[in-house]
């Protein structure tokens, strides 16, 4: 059917044009529409790309340490030298008189970038460990804790919210009081207390055994203290969905509770969950850094971005890069997740009210 | 209204009991957390240790241990296991620093948060809005302790810009000017995160409110735009901010300021808690947890009342 270009262009003509191309106007799933909106948001996609790059770089920590830096994350190089421009340079400066002036020594070498053949790209720390290697391994740990705790926290919150929202009554009362209780705790204080208590001898109860120093400790502590922050808003959404006709219809058709929860309710909150997940990963990376900084998170000598900053704290005047570089890594990672999460929310549901509260 | 307050206060009391009990459980269940040998010192005999166990009720079942600890905490005689200092007086000693930090930072973040939110909502889509959005996102993506370290390095420890004194708290009563100078950096650092967050929340609230019918009515009546913005839009957009502020302020007083206090060495309640946790010292942790939970619970009641007062459509139930 040819359209006359002189006739007025209306919605009907648009439909006809579309009909010519595809035969008929197809229904488009909300996910496809969301993807179309997201695809146009170059800033969000750019920051998603940045996050992916950071993840890939950190997961290449092993090969980088082995083949380029030629050292492990916990290998000391005190008293050793490396070659830069044909000259030997101390990894950690020796004390003594140089040119008639006294130097205290113990100052690690600064960032070499590529001048030392890939060694000490970001300098060394006070024990002569390669900062770039520790940064990548630390990033791997920070990302593991951040993403792992976000997965556990979101899954638990989702199950609690579904149970509370679907069954209501007693189940809702108990779960809501449980949320209230964690909510009433000072979050950071609770996390520090749990983290420190568990990192002394690990956890050996109820048939579960976690060694002290395990990454599971900060992961579980963070996911536990943040459950209500995800669970509460999700419960609210499910409570309102529970009253909708389609749920009633499913129940009337004899659908089992599990079926209603997972095939009727869950798809309707999936977009909120996705947005929450992105933002909570960002939040958890920050929480992990704070805990590790206070000594209640990832335990040394294991690196994480938080412990690296804590190590650099006392040397901020003589070796500022020790604290500055891991901090920049955190800011870039968290910023990329926050911006992508924002774009994702706008794409999935432009009118959504999902927000990370802290 | 009165029944609402009474019911909430009873609820608050129950929450306090539950929180303190859970804290107790966390620390009693730590293997190797037995405090008696530590208190007795290195040269203690078994008889000394047994004596201390007796005095601290450590041989009793844990619920009566818990009860004994609560009794001594509220009578003000609870002592730290490691330093033997009185817990209540140590918390009292930290309160001026913590409150100075939190109140100052709260004023800054509320003021700037509202300013930033209004500017970016009014100029939505223009470059000032975009710049503010980017800055706000960077602000909420920075670890507060890292920002504190960097700021302290740049403006207190490096010589060319060392305009500010380096760390520690000076009492307001001893020297108001030094008090201000010592706290200026911590205030700004603690406020940065919240300014970004509040600005973003307020911006989206204002943009939602602007499309309401009553705002259109106000504009149609011919009210000047400034009056519409302040009297009609801002007033309603600020209600959620009030709630947020109440809860955040309580959280900051109750321990979220730990990181800022530690980085700037302010010796407040948060830092006391952090130090006690490192040495697994149960009594101070108990004291600080109850102090913090008290503020969180009380502020949530106050916020609910304020909310009902600001928005008469909501009845406290």
Image: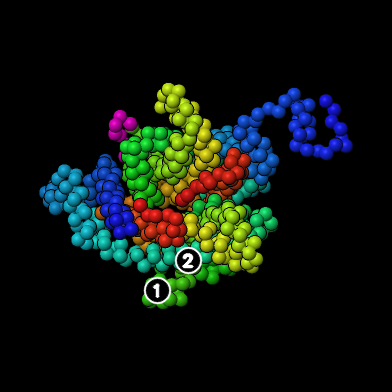
Mark closer to the chain start, 2 or 1 = 2
What residue lies at 26% left-to-right and 44% top-to-bottom?
Answer: B25
| SS state under label 2 | helix
Q: Is residue A300 left or right of residue A203?
A: right
Describe the element under mark 1 as helix, strand or loop. Answer: loop
Q: Which residue in the rendered view is the most extreme toward the right?
A: A6
Residue B27 shown left or right of residue B111 in the figure: left
Q: Nearer the viewer, residue A154 or B303?
A: B303
What numbered label is drawn on residue A327? none
Where does the image place residue B309, in percent across and percent down from the top left? 42, 61
Q: Which residue is mark 2?
A: B107
Tell me where residue B98 sits by quadrant: bottom left
Q: Residues within 10 Å of mark 2 (few under 14, many from 20)?
A: few
Label 2, label 1: how far apart the Cα atoms are? 17 Å
User: Disc 1 designates what residue?
Assistant: B172
Task: Specify start and end residues of the magenta stretch as a single range.
Answer: A201-208
Which one is in front, B162 or A167? A167
Residue at the image point whose x is 42% and y is 63% from the top: B102
């Amino acid at each position: 059917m040819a359209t006359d270009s002189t006739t007025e262009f209306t919605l009907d003509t648009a439909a006809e044009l579309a009909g010519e191309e595809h035969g008929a106007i197809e229904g488009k799933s909300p996910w496809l529409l969301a993807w179309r909106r997201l695809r146009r948001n170059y800033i969000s996609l750019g920051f998603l790309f940045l996050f992916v790059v950071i993840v890939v770089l950190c997961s290449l920590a092993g090969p980088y340490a082995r083949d380029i830096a030629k050292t492990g994350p916990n290998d000391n190089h005190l008293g050793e030298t490396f070659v830069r421009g044909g000259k030997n340079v101390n990894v950690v400066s020796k004390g003594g008189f140089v040119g008639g002036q006294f130097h205290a020594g113990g100052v690690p070498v600064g960032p070499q970038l590529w001048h030392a053949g890939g060694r000490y790209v970001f300098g060394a720390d006070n024990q002569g460990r390669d900062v770039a290697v520790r940064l990548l391994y630390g990033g791997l740990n920070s990302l593991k804790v951040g993403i792992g705790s976000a997965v556990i926290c979101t899954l638990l919150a989702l199950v609690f919210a579904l149970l509370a929202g679907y069954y209501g009554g007693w189940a809702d009362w108990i779960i809501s009081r449980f949320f209230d209780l964690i909510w009433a705790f000072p979050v950071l204080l609770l996390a520090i207390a749990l983290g420190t208590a568990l990192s002394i001898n690990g956890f050996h109860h109820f048939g579960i055994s976690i060694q002290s120093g395990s990454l599971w400790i900060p992961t579980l502590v963070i996911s536990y203290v943040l459950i209500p922050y995800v669970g509460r808003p999700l419960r609210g959404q499910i409570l309102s969905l529970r009253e909708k006709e389609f749920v009633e219809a499913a129940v009337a058709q004899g659908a089992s509770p599990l079926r209603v929860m997972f095939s009727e309710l869950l798809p309707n909150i999936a977009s909120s969950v996705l947005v929450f997940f992105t933002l909570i990963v960002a939040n958890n990376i920050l929480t992990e850094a704070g805990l590790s900084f206070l000594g209640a998170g990832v335990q040394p000598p294991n690196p994480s971005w938080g412990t690296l900053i804590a190590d650099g704290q006392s040397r901020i005047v003589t070796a500022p890069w020790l604290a500055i570089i891991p901090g920049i890594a955190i800011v870039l990672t968290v910023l990329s997740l926050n911006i992508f999460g924002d774009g994702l929310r706008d794409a999935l549901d432009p009118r959504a009210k999902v927000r990370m509260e802290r | 209204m009165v029944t609402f307050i009474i019911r909430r206060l009873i609820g608050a009391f129950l929450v306090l009991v539950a929180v303190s009990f859970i804290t107790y459980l966390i620390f009693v269940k730590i293997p190797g957390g037995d405090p008696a040998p530590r208190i007795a010192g290195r040269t203690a005999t078994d008889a000394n240790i047994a004596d201390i166990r007796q005095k601290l009720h450590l041989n009793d079942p844990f619920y009566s241990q818990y009860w004994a600890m609560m009794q001594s905490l509220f009578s003000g005689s609870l002592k730290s296991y490691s330093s033997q200092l009185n817990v209540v007086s140590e918390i009292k000693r930290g309160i001026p620093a913590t409150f100075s930090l939190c109140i100052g930072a709260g004023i800054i973040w509320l003021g700037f948060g509202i300013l930033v939110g209004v500017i970016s909502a009014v100029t939505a889509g223009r470059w000032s809005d975009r710049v503010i959005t980017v800055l706000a996102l960077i602000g909420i993506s920075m670890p507060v302790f890292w920002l504190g370290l960097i700021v302290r390095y740049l403006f207190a420890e490096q010589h060319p810009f060392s305009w500010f004194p380096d760390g520690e708290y000076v009492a307001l009563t001893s020297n108001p000017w030094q008090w201000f100078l010592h706290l200026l950096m911590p205030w700004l650092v603690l406020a940065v995160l919240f300014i970004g967050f509040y600005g973003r929340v307020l911006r989206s609230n204002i943009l939602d409110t602007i499309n309401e019918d009553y705002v259109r009515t106000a504009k149609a009546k011919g009210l000047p735009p400034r009056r519409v913005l302040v009297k009609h839009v801002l007033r309603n957009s600020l209600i959620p901010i009030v709630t947020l502020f109440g809860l955040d302020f309580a959280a900051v007083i109750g321990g979220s300021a730990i990181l800022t206090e530690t980085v700037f060495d302010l010796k407040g309640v948060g830092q006391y808690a952090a130090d006690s946790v490192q040495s697994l010292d149960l009594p101070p942790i108990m004291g600080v947890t109850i102090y913090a939970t008290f503020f969180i619970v009380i502020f949530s009641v106050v916020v609910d009342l304020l909310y009902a007062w600001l928005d008469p459509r909501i009845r406290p139930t």
